[in-house]
Structure formats: C-alpha cells, structure tokens
C-alpha cells in the first residue's frame, strides 16, 4: 500500500499499548509494496526500541504468523522473520478492520534496493532449502493451501481481454494502460496460453509438495550490513512443488536476480537438487499471469489511489523489458520445447 490507511495516530498508539504493552510510540507509515491490502509502519517505542508493524485487510490466515514462528523458533531457521507475541501470547490481533502483526525492525534494505553479497546468496539458498525440507506438524498443515494449478488467474486475464475488445472509457491512467496492453496483446495471449498448456500437463503428474513461501522475490528479502539477511512476508504460504519458489532464482522479477553467478551461489547454499524444467516454466508464466490480473484490478479500482495505479502501470511495463520476467519465461519454455 503506497498511501496510508485511514487510521488516527492515537488509534495506532492505543492498539499497540493494549495488545503489546508498548507506550509512548510513534508510527511512521512506510509506502512499501504493491499489495493494496497491506500497510506497514515503523514503530518507535520508549527506550529506543524499534518495531515493524504490518496491518492486513481481508483474507488473513493464522498460518502466515504461526508457520514463520515455527520455522524460526522450533526449526532454528534464523533468517525467517517471526512475529512478536502480544501480551497474551498471541501472534496477531484483530482491531480497527485490520489484522495487526508486530516484528523486530530490520536495519537494512530490501533486495531491490541493495544487491546480495556472495555470503547472502548462499544464506538465502540455505534458508530456502531448510524451509523446503521442513515437515510441519498436523496442526499447522491443517488449512494450508495445496497447489491445484488453478485457472483463476488465467480466466481473470481473459475476462479483461474480452472487456478490452470494444475499448473502455477512463482517465489518463486507463488510456495509457490500454495503449500498452494493445501493443503487447499478442504476447500476453502467449503468456496465458502457455501457462494453461503447462498446467494441464502438470496436473497429470505427481511432483512432490514442499512448504513454499511462493513470493520470494527481492522485495521480500532484507539485506543488512555484515552479511545479515532476513526473509519476510509469508502471506502466501502453500504446499507446492519446490519450483514454485525456485522460479524466482534467475526469474528476473524487477530485472534483478537474473545472473548465472547468483544462481550458482544460491544453489551452493540450497544443496543438490533436481529441478523440473516444465514446472519452472509454468510457475514463471503463471506468476506473470497473476501479476497481470492484479494490475488490471488495480488500474480499474475506483477506490485505489493514483499512486497505487501509477505503480501498477509502471510494473506491467517493466515486465516486458529485455531480460525481465516475460523474456526469461519464454527462454524457460523454449528450453523444454
């Protein structure tokens, strides 16, 4: 969310006091991320303590806090960011229309702002390998989503394509968006078609399922001084083939993480593994399809801010740049055909 939610500073202070026992706090809104349902703040509390507050509106699942806490505290995966408990030992609290989650504040930058060192690439590989090898207890497995190769994203994009055939009226952002879409319509068709083609093949196979972060791009990896690294934003946990996560390594999201030497360092930490090239190509196309649908929803959302809509327009344009996600997905497809 790039614009702050309609919450008074006093309301934030009161909730933090009631739920976490934090007093004399100051909340600074941080315009981070493309998720319009999440807002984040830096919290400065008494005694110089600093925290990271995340507010989630709609579609909150307890697993997004319970599983990272399990990975960090029970499995000893230090680079997994775990939430801090409330005064009554809960990992989140519901208040003022949001689910509130409080974390330690990580001094550093995300992977879009600062490149990973060689040590950090190895640490990221070791972290993701440990997550993929984790066996969850039944209490945490219950309710956790499983890969179904759903047609939801593909059908959503096609619905917009049908709407675009006769043109749509709108403001300047809509006009620029539709001009870009028209210029790339054939390639967008290819992305959606190949995603569906590969999904139909993978549905007939039985790839092993592991615990996946499923959104482990550079923005969700924090890097600090002295080779510190932390993985955040576990909102989209799922049991899926490991390629659901591995497609980001070398996948080019944000025109980053697309260098062979980075992949080599990552897999040095991850360990030996057989990668299914068809699953890798599918997840790269499916990710683009998902992004296309979410950007369409954002552009045509009457309640979305100008800043969020402009960000959506910037993101869709960047995906079609050389060596960005669309070009890399095409190369992954060509490798199996």
Image (cartoon, helix red, strand yellow):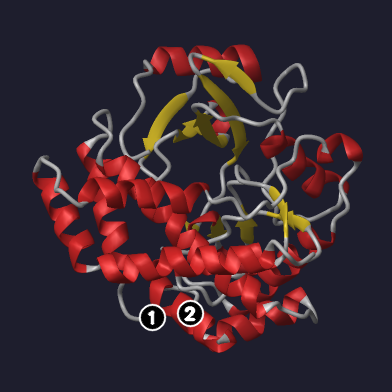
Q: Quadrant of the C terminus?
A: bottom right
Q: At 44% across and 13% down in the image, what residue appears?
A: 11
Whole-angstrom CA distance, mark 2 to mark 1, is 7 Å
Work out whether residue 226 can be spotted: no
Mark number, residue 62 = none
Q: Quadrant of the N terminus?
A: top left
N-terminal-most mark, 2 or 1: 2
Q: Residues within 10 Å of mark 1 (few under 14, many from 20)?
A: many
Which label sits in the foreground, 2 or 1? 1
Residue 108 in percent (x, y) is at 50, 56
Q: Is residue 329 left or right of residue 239?
A: left
Residue 21 in percent (x, y) is at 64, 17
On screen, residue 173 above or below 122: above
Q: At 63% across and 76% down in the image, what residue appears?
A: 278
Disc 2 is placed on an element classified as loop
Residue 302 in percent (x, y) is at 24, 30
Q: Is residue 210 left or right of residue 18?
A: right
Q: Considering depth in this image, is 223 or 275 the residue closer to the camera?
A: 275
Q: Is residue 331 left or right of residue 71?
A: left
Residue 39 in percent (x, y) is at 44, 34
Residue 142 lies in quadrant:
top right
Q: At 56% across and 59% down in the image, what residue appears?
A: 221
Q: Residues within 10 Å of mark 2 (few under 14, many from 20)?
A: some
Q: At 52% across and 34% down in the image, what residue appears?
A: 54
Q: Considering depth in this image, is 49 or 241 the residue closer to the camera?
A: 241
- Disc 1: which residue: 323
Residue 260 lies in quadrant:
bottom right
Disc 1 is placed on an element classified as loop
- Disc 2: which residue: 258
User: Do tag 2 and tag 1 residues touch (Cβ < 8 Å)?
Assistant: yes
Work out whether residue 328 can be spotted: yes
**Total residue callouts:** 2
């Amino acid at each position: 969310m790039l614009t702050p939610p309609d919450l008074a500073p006093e309301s934030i202070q009161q909730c933090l006091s009631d739920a976490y026992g934090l007093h004399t706090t100051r909340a600074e809104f941080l315009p981070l991320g493309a998720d319009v349902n999440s807002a984040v703040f830096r919290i400065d509390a008494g005694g110089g303590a600093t925290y990271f507050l995340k507010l989630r509106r709609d579609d909150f699942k307890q697993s997004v806090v319970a599983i990272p806490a399990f990975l960090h505290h029970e499995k000893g995966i230090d680079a997994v960011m775990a939430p801090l408990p409330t005064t009554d030992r809960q990992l989140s609290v519901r208040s003022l229309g949001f689910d509130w989650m409080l974390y330690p504040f990580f001094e550093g930058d995300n992977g879009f702002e600062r490149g990973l060192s060689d040590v950090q690439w190895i640490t990221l590989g070791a972290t993701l390998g440990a997550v993929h090898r984790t066996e969850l207890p039944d209490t945490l497995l219950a309710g956790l989503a499983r890969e179904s190769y759903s047609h939801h994203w593909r059908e959503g994009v096609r619905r917009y394509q049908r709407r675009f055939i006769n043109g749509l009226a709108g403001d300047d952002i809509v006009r620029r968006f539709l001009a870009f879409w028209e210029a790339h319509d054939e390639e967008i068709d290819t992305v959606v078609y190949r995603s569906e083609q590969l999904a139909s093949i993978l549905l007939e196979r039985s790839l092993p399922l592991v615990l996946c972060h499923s959104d482990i791009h550079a923005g969700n990896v924090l890097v600090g001084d002295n080779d510190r690294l932390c993985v955040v934003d576990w909102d989209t946990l799922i049991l899926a083939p490991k390629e659901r996560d591995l497609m980001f390594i070398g996948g080019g999201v944000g025109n980053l993480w697309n260098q062979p030497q980075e992949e080599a360092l990552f897999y040095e930490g991850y360990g030996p593994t057989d990668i299914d090239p068809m699953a890798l190509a599918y997840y790269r196309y499916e990710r683009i399809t998902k992004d296309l649908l979410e950007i369409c929803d954002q552009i045509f959302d009457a309640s979305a801010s100008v800043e969020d809509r402009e960000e959506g327009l910037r993101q869709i344009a960047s995906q079609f740049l050389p060596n960005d996600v669309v070009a890399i997905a095409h190369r992954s497809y060509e490798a199996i055909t």
